[in-house]
Amino acid sequence: MLGQSLNSPWASSSGVYTHTWTYQVTHPGRTIVEVALTSVNSVDDDDGTFARFGVSQVVSDSGVENFGDDGPPVVARDGVTSVSVRMFVVNSFARGRVSRNFW
């Protein structure tokens, strides 16, 4: 591994909320992007707490790949220029981790 970039995004809502973050990548080689939910907490007494987090888009030597709302937690591509991740929350505060590993 040649390097790594980490981020810790979060989203919160007492209803339904979706947020997308886009990260630029300048490493010319292989990039492995991994996302994970690190915590999910209820913002009220409702029992409908839910969160989801995944890769929504990758722009690389393979072109533009859109994964939508139910994206995978790990993607590996060569020549990545940008990666977008999407978090969906319902009645919750959620925090995640985005790891970009360069090979």
Image (cartoon, rainbow, N blue to C red):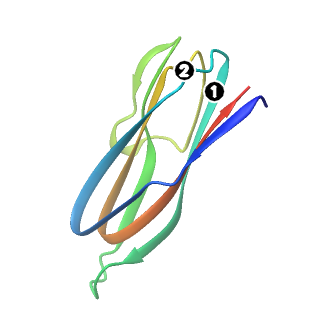
Is mark 1 in CB contact (under 8 Å) with mark 2?
yes
Give SS at disc 1: strand
Point 22% across, 62% down: residue: 16
Horizontally, residue 89 falls left or right of residue 31, namely left
Quadrant placement of the N terminus: top right
Residue on which the image places disc 1: 31
Compared with residue 99, is residue 52 higher up or lower down, i.e. above or below?
Answer: below
Could you say which quadrant of the image residue 101 lies in? Answer: top right
Horizontally, residue 3 falls left or right of residue 17, namely right
The single residue placed furthest to the left in the displayed view is 15
Measure the C-alpha gap from mark 1 to mark 2. 6 Å
Horizontally, residue 66 falls left or right of residue 2, namely left
Quadrant placement of the C terminus: top right
Give the image location of residue 55, x and y in percent.
Answer: 46, 39
Q: Viewer-proximal residue, 49 or 98?
A: 98
Point 34% across, 74% down: residue: 49
Compared with residue 96, is residue 82 higher up or lower down, i.e. above or below?
Answer: above
Q: Between disc 1 and disc 2, whose residue precedes?
A: 1
- For label 1, count other residues whose C-alpha is less than 10 Å away and answer few (under 14), some (14-19) or many (20+): many
Residue on which the image places disc 2: 80
Could you say which quadrant of the image residue 36 lies in? Answer: bottom right
